[in-house]
Amino acid sequence: MTTINIRTKKPLTRQQQSLLALLLKNSPNLVTHTQIAQYVGGYTGSPRYDHEYSRSLTHRLRERLENPDMIVNVSGIGYKIVVEE
């Protein structure tokens, strides 16, 4: 198991922690908007809702990370995290 040190500017909310954990667990693979909405929010809404929910949550998470560029947007599909080892 690899230990990864991720620095934040402010403490993360529970939802932000869940999103970060989901991205790390699936790294280097992509996590879709629907997967984020289901895992973090427990929602099974429309694809448009899933997209808006994951976009908003990811935006707020990036604001708290010292290296926001580690979360990569895959346009229209979802996000993935790029971690340097």
Image (tube, helix red, strand yellow):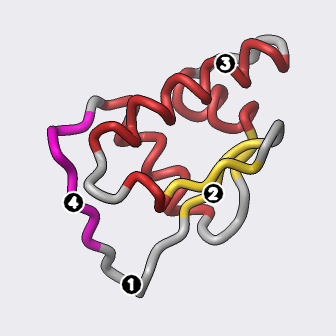
Three-letter code, disc 4: Arg
- Compared with 84, 43 (above or below) is above
Residue density around tag 2, few if under 14, some if 14–19, many if 20 or more, within 10 Å: many
Residue stretch in magenta: 5-12
Which x, y percent locates residue 75?
79, 43
Callout 1: helix, strand or loop? loop
Three-letter code, disc 3: Glu
Q: Residue at x 50, y 62 (%)?
A: 24
Q: CA distance from mark 3 to mark 1?
A: 32 Å
Residue density around tag 1, few if under 14, some if 14–19, many if 20 or more, within 10 Å: few
Work out whether mark 3 precedes mark 4 in sequence or the reverse, and give the earlier one. 4
Q: CA distance from mark 1 to mark 2?
A: 18 Å
Work out whether mark 4 precedes mark 2 in sequence or the reverse, and give the earlier one. 4
**SS assignment for the magenta stretch, majority:** loop
Q: Residue at x 54, y 69 (%)?
A: 82
Q: Is 25 displayed left or right of 10 in the figure? A: right
Q: Quadrant for the N terminus, please.
A: bottom left
Residue density around tag 4, few if under 14, some if 14–19, many if 20 or more, within 10 Å: few
Callout 2: helix, strand or loop? strand
- Circle 1 residue: 2
Q: Is residue 8 part of the magenta span, yes or no? A: yes
Q: CA distance from mark 2 to mark 3?
A: 16 Å
Q: Mark 4 touching mark 2, by CB under 8 A?
A: no
Q: Which is closer to the viewer, label 1 or label 4? A: 4
Q: Residue at x 52, y 54 (%)?
A: 71
Which label belongs to residue 80? 2
- Circle 4 residue: 7
Work out whether mark 1 precedes mark 4 in sequence or the reverse, and give the earlier one. 1
Q: Mark 2 touching mark 3, by CB under 8 A?
A: no
